[in-house]
Image (cartoon, rainbow, N blue to C red):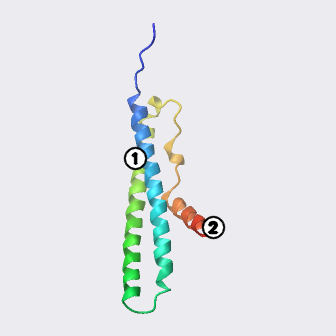
Amino acid sequence: MKKKYRPNLYEEQYEALLNAVCEGQWRLISATETVIKKQGVIALYPEGPDKKHAVKDCEEAKYSLLCAIGAYDARRQEAIEYFKQNFEHLEGWADGTNKATSHAIIENAYYNFYRK
C-alpha cells in the first residue's frame, strides 16, 4: 500500500518566506543600480531646470532604495525567526541566517555595477 503524500506546511511556509527574501534581494539590487545611475548623471547637467529635475529624480530613487532596504531586512528577519521557531519541522532546510545583509547586497550591487 502506497503512503499518501502529506505536505509539510512548515516547509511550504518557510519556502514562501525564502522566496520573499529572494524577491526583496532582486528589488534591492535594482533600486541600488537606479540610484547609481541617477546620481551619476546629475553632474552632467548644467545648472537649471534639467539639473533640478535630475536631483529630484535621484532623491525619489534614494527613497525607493530606503524602502527596499526596509522590506528586505523585514523579510530576512521573518525567515530567520520562522526557522528558529520551527527548525524541528524543517528537515533538510538550511538556516535562513546565512542570507546576506542589505548592506552586503548594496555593496555587491555597487561593485558589480562598475564591473560591467
The extreme top residue here reads 1
Local SS, label 2: helix
For the residue pair 79 and 57, the one nearer the viewer reads as: 57
Q: Which residue occupies the foreground of this view, 63 or 104?
A: 63
- Residue 1 in the image: x percent, y percent? 45, 6
Give me the C-alpha separation between circle 1 and circle 2. Answer: 33 Å
Q: Residue at x 42, y 61 (%)?
A: 69
Horizontal placement of 36 versus 62: left or right?
right
User: CB atoms at circles 1 and 2 under 8 Å apart?
Assistant: no
The percent position of residue 66, horizontal first and vertical second, equals: 40, 66
Residue 56 image label: none
- Check residue 115 in the rendering and tell me which mark sits there, or answer none: 2
Instruction: Count residues near mark 2 (Cα–Cα under 10 Å), then give few for <14, some for 14-19, many for 20+.
Output: few
Q: Is residue 40 above or below residue 32?
A: below
Asked if residue 49 lies left or right of residue 110, the reply is left
Q: Is residue 40 above or below residue 3?
A: below
Residue 5 visible at all: yes
Instruction: Give me the residue at 51% from left, 46% from top.
Output: 97
Furthest residue in direction right, as rendered: 115
Find disc 1 in the rendering and name its residue. Answer: 78
Q: Quadrant of the C terminus?
A: bottom right
Q: Position of residue 32 (x, y in %)?
A: 48, 66
- Closest to the observer, 49 or 56: 49
* Three-letter code for the amino acid on which mark 2 is drawn: Arg
Which label lies toward us, 1 or 2? 2
